[in-house]
Image (cartoon, rainbow, N blue to C red):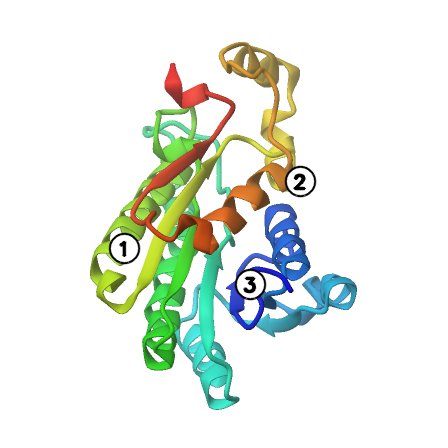
């Protein structure tokens, strides 16, 4: 029996690298995982592999999020945990060059979308009365200034504050909330920029461990923060960045 046996955990962004790795970690440990993406097609193969249940909704639509999550409750599903992993990278731009429409979309997906999932999921978790945990996938870009990351870093800084306030407001219900703040994982979303030799080399030279993270190295700490081993940890932002933000 795994340590998540009998617990239902919703993972958004399950069609991406970190999200899919998180689904696999939780499924191996006995969780009833709901793998969410914008379309069922994005998670169909993952669900067949892991036994997770697919769920589709649009992170930019409050109605879509509400209907999907309230639908779980109407089907008798007691939601216990949430991993807000879905994200949009946006652009690489300075403050004076940023396209404000891109900024708005990055905020809409990374911060507003995660807040809306938290809004409706927390209601279901409170109704179930079994406590629970949120883990929000933030970024090192929320902790330190990174060149060209005005939109992405701002969205993740907002997400970190959502985490802290969620921890404060929901603690009385036995619900914890934490963030993980990874360095770059070479997913398709990141490789187009961070994979450039002129970007990759200087950045890794400043990182004590000197390498990028793997998807499993992010999924493991996410699972830890969801688990009872982290039962007294709430409201933190955990860097998973090879020591980069310790400089």
Q: Is residue 17 left or right of residue 100?
A: right
The disc placed on residue 178 is none
State which mark lies toward you, 1 or 3: 3
Q: In this figure, which residue is indicated by the disc labeled 3?
A: 4
Q: Name the residue at 34% across, 70% down.
A: 122
Q: Earlier in the sequence, mark 1 or mark 2?
A: 1
| Residue 49 at x, y percent in the picture | 78, 63
Q: In this figure, which residue is indicated by the disc labeled 1?
A: 167
| Residue 173 at x, y percent in the picture | 27, 68
Q: Name the residue at 45% across, 84% down.
A: 73
The disc placed on residue 188 is 2
Q: Earlier in the sequence, mark 1 or mark 3?
A: 3
User: For numbered disc 3, what is the local secondary structure?
Assistant: loop
Distance CA(mark 1)–CA(mark 3) = 21 Å
Disc 2 + disc 3, Cβ < 8 Å: no
User: For numbered disc 1, what is the local secondary structure?
Assistant: helix
- Camera-side residue of 13 and 226: 226
Mark 2 closeness class: few <14, some 14–19, many ≥20 residues within 10 Å: few
Distance CA(mark 2)–CA(mark 3) = 30 Å
| Residue 126 at x, y percent in the picture | 32, 75
Query: Does residue 83 appear in the picture of this structure?
Result: yes
- Camera-side residue of 238 and 202: 238
- Camera-side residue of 164 and 106: 164
State which mark lies toward you, 2 or 3: 3
Q: Is residue 125 left or right of residue 49?
A: left
Q: Is residue 235 placed above or below 118 in the rendered structure?
A: above
State which mark lies toward you, 1 or 2: 1
Q: Earlier in the sequence, mark 2 or mark 3?
A: 3
Mark 3 closeness class: few <14, some 14–19, many ≥20 residues within 10 Å: many
Q: Is residue 26 placed above or below 93 in the rendered structure?
A: below
């Amino acid at each position: 029996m795994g340590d998540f046996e009998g617990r239902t955990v919703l993972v958004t962004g399950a069609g991406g690298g970190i999200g899919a790795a998180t689904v696999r970690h939780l499924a191996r440990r006995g969780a009833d995982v709901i793998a969410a993406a914008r379309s069922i097609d994005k998670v169909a193969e993952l669900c067949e592999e892991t036994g997770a249940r697919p769920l589709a909704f649009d992170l930019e639509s409050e109605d879509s999020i509400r209907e999907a999550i309230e639908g779980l409750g109407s089907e008798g599903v007691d939601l216990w945990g949430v991993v807000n992993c879905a994200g949009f990278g946006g652009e690489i731009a300075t403050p004076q060059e940023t396209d404000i429409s891109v900024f708005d979309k990055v905020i809409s997906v990374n911060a507003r979308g995660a807040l809306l999932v938290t809004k409706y999921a927390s209601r279901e978790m409170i109704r179930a009365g079994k406590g629970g945990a949120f883990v929000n996938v933030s970024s090192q870009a929320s902790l330190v200034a990174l060149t060209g990351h005005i939109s992405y870093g701002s969205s993740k800084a907002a997400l970190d504050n959502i985490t802290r306030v969620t921890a404060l407001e929901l603690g009385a219900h036995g619900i914890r909330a934490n963030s993980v703040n990874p360095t770059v994982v070479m997913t398709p979303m990141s490789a187009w920029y961070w994979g450039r030799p002129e970007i990759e080399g200087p950045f890794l030279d400043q990182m004590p461990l000197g390498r990028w993270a793997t998807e499993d190295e992010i999924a493991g700490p996410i699972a830890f923060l969801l688990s009872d081993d982290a039962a007294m940890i709430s409201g933190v932002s955990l860097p998973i960045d090879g020591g980069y933000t310790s400089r």
